[in-house]
Amino acid sequence: MKPGIIVAKIYGAKEDIDRGNWIAPLIDRRVKVDPHNCKKDVRGIILSAAGPNNLIGSYQFTFLNKGSADGLNVNDKLYIYRKGTSAPGVDADLPEVNVAELVVVATTDKYATAYTLGGMEHFEAGAHFKTAVPETHYLDTSAPAVEDSSTDGPQNQ
């Protein structure tokens, strides 16, 4: 080191480096991914892929039109789903079919970024997503039993 000059050896780079580029402290951008079911049912659409591809598949990032103000949090599990209502003659009561699984890795008030964990097929901007809210709800076994008030007590038969 000399006044105003530092000599260093570069061991790895993710982008091209040119003379005159600024040097900054290393920022660890890794996010620990620990997907879990969300407590709130949030539905929205995929705004775009984070990269140049139109088709989004496994191990890619996407931008969502919902954020923390809508109930999304980091590590919330999401599903990309399709419903067979767009084709003529298809029953509108068909269930939603999950085709890909994502996890939220960053949020702002209005938007979120998600990472695609895997999927049965690709999807693109405009695809619908929903939070992974369990469809089966179990009774709380620690809650006291509620008696049926429609009867005046035990009925003998």
Image (spheres, rainbow, N blue to C red):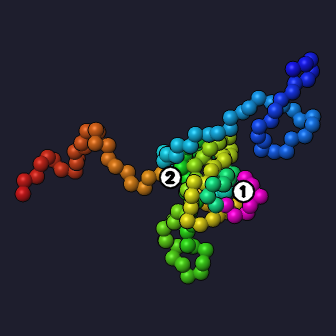
Left or right relative to 137: residue 20: right
For residue 5, above or below residue 121 = above
Query: Helix or strand or loop: what does disc 2 sit on?
Result: loop
The answer to which of marks 1 and 2 sits earlier in the sequence is: 1
Query: Helix or strand or loop: what does disc 1 sit on?
Result: strand
Query: Which of 88/48 is in front?
Result: 48
The residue shown at (18%, 50%) is: 151
Query: Which of 85/82 is in front?
Result: 82
Neighbours of disc 1 within 10 Å: few (<14), some (14-19), many (20+): many
Neighbours of disc 2 within 10 Å: few (<14), some (14-19), many (20+): many
Looking at the picture, how far across and down is residue 25, in whole percent? 76, 29
The residue shown at (63%, 54%) is: 59
For residue 140, above or below residue 43 = above
Q: What residue type is disc 1 on?
A: Ser
Looking at the picture, how far across and down is residue 113, in whole percent? 66, 47
The quadrant where residue 57 appears: bottom right
Could you tell me what secondary structure mostly forms the magenta stretch? Answer: loop
Q: In which quarter of the image is the C terminus?
A: bottom left
Q: Can residue 63 be seen in this view?
A: yes
Q: What stretch is highlighted in magenta?
A: 49-56
Q: Which mark is residue 132?
A: 2
Left or right relative to 5: residue 95: left
The residue shown at (58%, 49%) is: 103
Q: Residue 48 carries which label?
A: 1
